[in-house]
Image: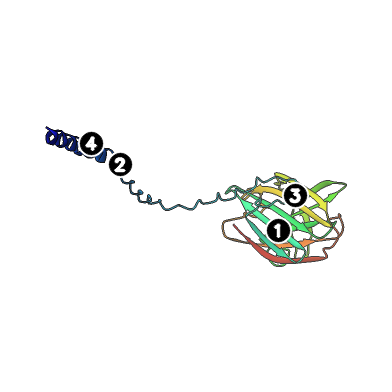
Amino acid sequence: MRFRRRFAVLVAFSVLFVILGAACSPLQVPPEPSPAPPSASLPQTPSTPSAPQPAEWSADGVITAGEYAGVQTFGDYEIQWTSDGNYIYIGMKAKTSGWLAVGIQPGTRMKDADMVLGFVKDDKATIYDFFCTGDYGPHSPDTELGGANDILEFGGKEAGGYTTIEFKRLLDTGDKYDISIFKGANKIIWSYGLDDQSTQKHVSRGYGEIEL
């Protein structure tokens, strides 16, 4: 009988030991997921800055950036221009408080030049549509020769020792005393004086061209 009891006790301890050992076994921790590969980034297309828009033309006697497409400088005289295919817009500026002028397509010297002359006096701009009939003048208003004044808009200002005149006319006015301005190079004659009187002789003049 004692042997049977001891054997039963030994079996009971063995079963208990197995149960406890199973309960104390280490927990199975699931493996950490592998990090996902970085997603491929699409190439970035550089943004293209918007092209600056040309400034709107205004006959206010102030030449602003982008208002004109072309520019030529002759010492203290500067001329700028642009065209929309029907009209030409011109701004001329000189270091003077007197008149300034531009002649389109001169022949010899001043002869046959279609001239526009302007000045500013008492903050008021005055402009003339002239035609020159001789090498050194005279230059008379188109209206006195049987033509018309074909300057459609104009303005001017004096500031900082400079005078600026702006004006607009048709490329082809149909006036016999106006010379048509065409696509390509157009010869010009330019000048300015120190007085507001258009009859006063220029102090500087020269030749050049504007290209549409």
Which is nearer the N-term, disc 4 or disc 1? 4
Q: Nearer the viewer, mark 3 or mark 4?
A: 4
SS assignment at label 4: helix
Q: Which residue is mark 3?
A: 62
Q: CA distance from mark 2 to mark 1?
A: 91 Å
Identified by mark 3, the residue type is Val
Please state, as top left, top right, bottom left or bottom right, where the N terminus lies in the image.
top left
Could you say which disc has been placed on residue 16 in the image? 4
**Image position of 3 with respect to 48: above or below:** above
Q: CA distance from mark 4 to mark 1?
A: 111 Å
User: Is residue 63 or residue 136 the one in the foreground?
Assistant: 63
Q: Nearer the viewer, mark 2 or mark 1?
A: 2
Q: CA distance from mark 3 to mark 1?
A: 13 Å
Identified by mark 4, the residue type is Leu
Discs 2, 1 touching: Cβ within 8 Å = no
Please state, as top left, top right, bottom left or bottom right, where the C terminus lies in the image.
bottom right
User: Is residue 177 or residue 192 the one in the foreground?
Assistant: 192
Dot 1, crowdedness within 10 Å: few (<14), some or many (≥20)?
A: many
